[in-house]
Image: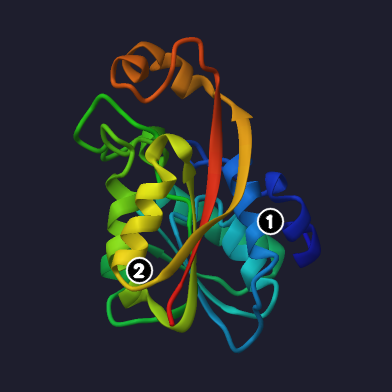
Protein backbone atom coordinates (compact mmCIF):
# COMPACT_ATOMS: atom_id res chain seq x y z
CA UNK A 1 0.00 0.00 0.00
CA UNK A 2 1.37 3.43 -0.89
CA UNK A 3 1.33 6.49 1.36
CA UNK A 4 -1.33 8.09 -0.80
CA UNK A 5 -3.62 5.07 -0.52
CA UNK A 6 -3.13 5.07 3.26
CA UNK A 7 -4.39 8.65 3.28
CA UNK A 8 -7.41 8.00 1.10
CA UNK A 9 -8.42 4.47 2.17
CA UNK A 10 -7.91 3.96 5.94
CA UNK A 11 -10.53 1.20 5.85
CA UNK A 12 -8.00 -0.99 4.00
CA UNK A 13 -5.60 -0.98 6.92
CA UNK A 14 -5.06 -4.15 8.94
CA UNK A 15 -7.40 -4.38 11.93
CA UNK A 16 -6.67 -7.04 14.52
CA UNK A 17 -9.36 -8.49 16.82
CA UNK A 18 -10.32 -6.01 19.53
CA UNK A 19 -8.83 -3.01 17.68
CA UNK A 20 -11.08 -0.07 16.82
CA UNK A 21 -11.80 0.01 13.10
CA UNK A 22 -11.77 3.46 11.41
CA UNK A 23 -15.32 4.81 11.44
CA UNK A 24 -17.24 8.08 11.09
CA UNK A 25 -15.36 9.78 13.93
CA UNK A 26 -12.04 8.78 12.34
CA UNK A 27 -13.14 10.23 9.02
CA UNK A 28 -14.30 13.48 10.63
CA UNK A 29 -10.98 13.87 12.43
CA UNK A 30 -9.12 13.05 9.22
CA UNK A 31 -10.98 15.87 7.48
CA UNK A 32 -9.95 18.29 10.21
CA UNK A 33 -6.36 17.05 9.98
CA UNK A 34 -6.23 17.97 6.28
CA UNK A 35 -6.50 21.65 7.20
CA UNK A 36 -3.54 21.69 9.59
CA UNK A 37 -0.06 22.66 8.43
CA UNK A 38 2.22 19.64 8.66
CA UNK A 39 5.60 18.70 7.30
CA UNK A 40 9.08 17.44 8.23
CA UNK A 41 9.55 20.10 10.90
CA UNK A 42 6.37 19.20 12.82
CA UNK A 43 6.00 16.83 15.77
CA UNK A 44 2.67 15.03 16.13
CA UNK A 45 1.18 12.65 18.69
CA UNK A 46 -1.99 10.60 18.37
CA UNK A 47 -3.71 9.49 21.57
CA UNK A 48 -5.54 6.20 21.08
CA UNK A 49 -4.18 5.34 17.64
CA UNK A 50 -6.10 2.10 16.99
CA UNK A 51 -5.04 0.94 13.53
CA UNK A 52 -2.84 4.01 13.13
CA UNK A 53 -5.04 5.45 10.37
CA UNK A 54 -4.73 9.09 11.48
CA UNK A 55 -1.12 8.84 12.61
CA UNK A 56 -0.22 7.48 9.18
CA UNK A 57 -1.94 10.38 7.44
CA UNK A 58 0.20 12.75 9.47
CA UNK A 59 3.34 10.69 8.85
CA UNK A 60 2.69 10.81 5.09
CA UNK A 61 3.41 14.58 5.22
CA UNK A 62 6.89 13.91 6.58
CA UNK A 63 6.00 14.89 10.14
CA UNK A 64 7.59 13.13 13.11
CA UNK A 65 4.67 11.12 14.50
CA UNK A 66 4.23 9.25 17.77
CA UNK A 67 1.18 7.00 18.14
CA UNK A 68 0.05 5.74 21.55
CA UNK A 69 -2.52 3.16 22.64
CA UNK A 70 -3.29 1.23 25.84
CA UNK A 71 -4.21 -1.80 23.72
CA UNK A 72 -1.26 -4.00 22.80
CA UNK A 73 -3.24 -5.33 19.82
CA UNK A 74 -3.65 -1.77 18.56
CA UNK A 75 0.08 -1.13 18.91
CA UNK A 76 0.80 -4.25 16.85
CA UNK A 77 -1.80 -3.26 14.22
CA UNK A 78 -0.40 0.26 13.90
CA UNK A 79 3.15 -1.04 13.51
CA UNK A 80 2.05 -3.52 10.85
CA UNK A 81 0.20 -0.79 8.96
CA UNK A 82 3.20 1.56 9.13
CA UNK A 83 5.37 -1.16 7.59
CA UNK A 84 2.77 -1.89 4.89
CA UNK A 85 2.55 1.80 4.04
CA UNK A 86 6.30 2.36 4.10
CA UNK A 87 5.95 5.16 6.64
CA UNK A 88 7.96 5.96 9.75
CA UNK A 89 5.78 5.82 12.85
CA UNK A 90 6.85 5.59 16.49
CA UNK A 91 4.21 3.45 18.20
CA UNK A 92 4.13 3.22 22.00
CA UNK A 93 2.11 1.02 24.33
CA UNK A 94 0.68 2.54 27.51
CA UNK A 95 -1.11 5.50 29.04
CA UNK A 96 -0.76 8.68 27.00
CA UNK A 97 0.18 10.88 29.98
CA UNK A 98 3.04 8.61 31.03
CA UNK A 99 4.28 8.10 27.48
CA UNK A 100 4.38 11.82 26.65
CA UNK A 101 5.80 13.15 29.91
CA UNK A 102 8.38 15.85 29.25
CA UNK A 103 7.56 16.11 25.52
CA UNK A 104 5.66 18.76 23.57
CA UNK A 105 4.03 18.54 20.17
CA UNK A 106 2.88 20.82 17.37
CA UNK A 107 -0.25 18.74 16.89
CA UNK A 108 -2.14 16.40 19.21
CA UNK A 109 -4.77 14.13 17.66
CA UNK A 110 -7.26 12.43 19.97
CA UNK A 111 -10.15 10.09 19.27
CA UNK A 112 -10.57 8.80 22.83
CA UNK A 113 -13.21 6.43 24.17
CA UNK A 114 -16.34 8.55 24.72
CA UNK A 115 -19.37 6.25 24.89
CA UNK A 116 -21.22 6.61 28.23
CA UNK A 117 -21.29 3.34 30.13
CA UNK A 118 -23.33 2.14 33.11
CA UNK A 119 -20.06 0.72 34.47
CA UNK A 120 -18.06 3.30 36.41
CA UNK A 121 -14.84 1.31 36.07
CA UNK A 122 -13.14 1.41 32.68
CA UNK A 123 -12.61 -1.98 31.02
CA UNK A 124 -9.05 -3.27 31.29
CA UNK A 125 -9.24 -5.55 28.25
CA UNK A 126 -11.40 -6.40 25.25
CA UNK A 127 -12.86 -4.33 22.44
CA UNK A 128 -14.87 -2.12 24.84
CA UNK A 129 -11.64 -0.38 25.86
CA UNK A 130 -11.92 1.51 22.58
CA UNK A 131 -15.27 3.11 23.43
CA UNK A 132 -16.36 2.78 27.10
CA UNK A 133 -15.56 5.97 29.03
CA UNK A 134 -17.47 5.98 32.32
CA UNK A 135 -21.02 7.09 33.16
CA UNK A 136 -20.78 10.47 31.38
CA UNK A 137 -18.34 9.33 28.69
CA UNK A 138 -15.80 11.95 29.76
CA UNK A 139 -13.21 9.88 31.63
CA UNK A 140 -10.55 10.25 28.92
CA UNK A 141 -11.84 13.52 27.48
CA UNK A 142 -11.34 15.32 30.80
CA UNK A 143 -7.84 13.88 31.23
CA UNK A 144 -6.88 15.13 27.78
CA UNK A 145 -8.29 18.59 28.53
CA UNK A 146 -6.27 18.80 31.74
CA UNK A 147 -3.08 17.55 30.13
CA UNK A 148 -3.34 19.52 26.86
CA UNK A 149 -1.31 22.62 27.86
CA UNK A 150 1.64 20.43 28.89
CA UNK A 151 1.44 18.51 25.60
CA UNK A 152 1.39 21.48 23.23
CA UNK A 153 4.32 23.51 21.97
CA UNK A 154 3.74 27.28 21.61
CA UNK A 155 1.19 27.63 18.81
CA UNK A 156 0.44 23.91 19.00
CA UNK A 157 -3.02 22.53 18.19
CA UNK A 158 -5.22 19.85 19.74
CA UNK A 159 -7.84 18.18 17.54
CA UNK A 160 -10.30 16.22 19.68
CA UNK A 161 -13.35 14.30 18.48
CA UNK A 162 -16.25 13.06 20.57
CA UNK A 163 -20.03 12.87 20.66
CA UNK A 164 -22.26 15.82 21.49
CA UNK A 165 -23.71 13.41 24.05
CA UNK A 166 -20.57 14.15 26.12
CA UNK A 167 -21.15 17.91 26.06
CA UNK A 168 -19.08 19.85 23.53
CA UNK A 169 -19.64 23.08 25.46
CA UNK A 170 -18.17 21.47 28.58
CA UNK A 171 -15.05 20.44 26.67
CA UNK A 172 -14.61 23.91 25.16
CA UNK A 173 -14.98 25.51 28.59
CA UNK A 174 -12.46 23.15 30.18
CA UNK A 175 -9.91 23.84 27.46
CA UNK A 176 -10.40 27.57 27.75
CA UNK A 177 -9.99 27.38 31.52
CA UNK A 178 -6.52 25.89 31.07
CA UNK A 179 -5.54 28.74 28.77
CA UNK A 180 -6.23 27.40 25.28
CA UNK A 181 -8.25 28.98 22.48
CA UNK A 182 -10.94 26.41 21.82
CA UNK A 183 -14.01 26.05 19.63
CA UNK A 184 -16.08 23.48 17.75
CA UNK A 185 -14.97 23.45 14.12
CA UNK A 186 -16.88 20.51 12.62
CA UNK A 187 -20.06 18.55 13.21
CA UNK A 188 -21.54 15.42 11.66
CA UNK A 189 -24.75 13.54 12.44
CA UNK A 190 -24.56 9.75 12.19
CA UNK A 191 -26.86 6.82 13.04
CA UNK A 192 -26.43 5.09 16.36
CA UNK A 193 -24.26 2.01 16.30
CA UNK A 194 -24.90 -1.31 18.08
CA UNK A 195 -23.37 -0.18 21.39
CA UNK A 196 -25.65 2.84 21.80
CA UNK A 197 -28.69 0.81 20.73
CA UNK A 198 -27.88 -1.80 23.36
CA UNK A 199 -27.80 0.93 26.04
CA UNK A 200 -30.90 2.85 24.96
CA UNK A 201 -32.88 2.30 28.17
CA UNK A 202 -29.96 3.31 30.38
CA UNK A 203 -29.08 6.36 28.25
CA UNK A 204 -32.67 7.56 28.38
CA UNK A 205 -32.88 7.00 32.15
CA UNK A 206 -29.71 9.07 32.61
CA UNK A 207 -31.00 11.89 30.41
CA UNK A 208 -28.25 11.32 27.86
CA UNK A 209 -30.69 10.49 25.07
CA UNK A 210 -34.28 11.31 24.30
CA UNK A 211 -37.00 8.75 23.71
CA UNK A 212 -36.80 7.23 20.24
CA UNK A 213 -33.51 8.93 19.46
CA UNK A 214 -31.29 6.98 17.09
CA UNK A 215 -28.75 9.49 15.76
CA UNK A 216 -25.82 11.22 17.43
CA UNK A 217 -23.86 14.33 16.54
CA UNK A 218 -20.09 14.10 16.43
CA UNK A 219 -17.97 17.19 16.98
CA UNK A 220 -14.38 18.21 16.35
CA UNK A 221 -12.97 20.59 18.93
CA UNK A 222 -9.85 22.54 17.95
CA UNK A 223 -7.83 24.05 20.76
CA UNK A 224 -4.64 26.07 20.28
CA UNK A 225 -1.95 27.21 22.65
CA UNK A 226 -0.78 30.82 22.34
Nearest the viewer among 189 and 133 is 189
The location of residue 118, given as percent across then percent down, is 26, 24
Q: Position of residue 203 (x, y in %)?
A: 35, 20
- 79 vs 128: above or below: below
Q: Residues within 10 Å of mark 1 (few under 14, many from 20)?
A: few
Instruction: Name which of mark 2 and mark 1 comes first in the sequence.
Output: 1
Can the viewer see residue 81 in this picture? yes
Q: Which residue is mark 1?
A: 31
Which residue corresponds to mark 2? Answer: 148
Side of 150 where 51 appears, left or right: right
Locate the N terminus and report the quarter of the image it occupies.
bottom right
Name the residue located 48 percent from the left edge and 78 percent from the top edge: 156
Viewer-closest of 64 and 33:
33
User: Quarter of the image holding residue 217?
Assistant: top right
**For the point 43% across and 82% down, which residue is it?**
226
Residue 66 rendering spot, x and y as whole percentages: 48, 71
Amino acid sequence: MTASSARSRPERLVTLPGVYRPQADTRLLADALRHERLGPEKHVVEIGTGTGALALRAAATGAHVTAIDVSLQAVVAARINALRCGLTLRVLHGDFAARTRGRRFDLVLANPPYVPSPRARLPSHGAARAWDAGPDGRELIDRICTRAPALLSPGGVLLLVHSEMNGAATTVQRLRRVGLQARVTRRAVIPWGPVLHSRRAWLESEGLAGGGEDREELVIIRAQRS
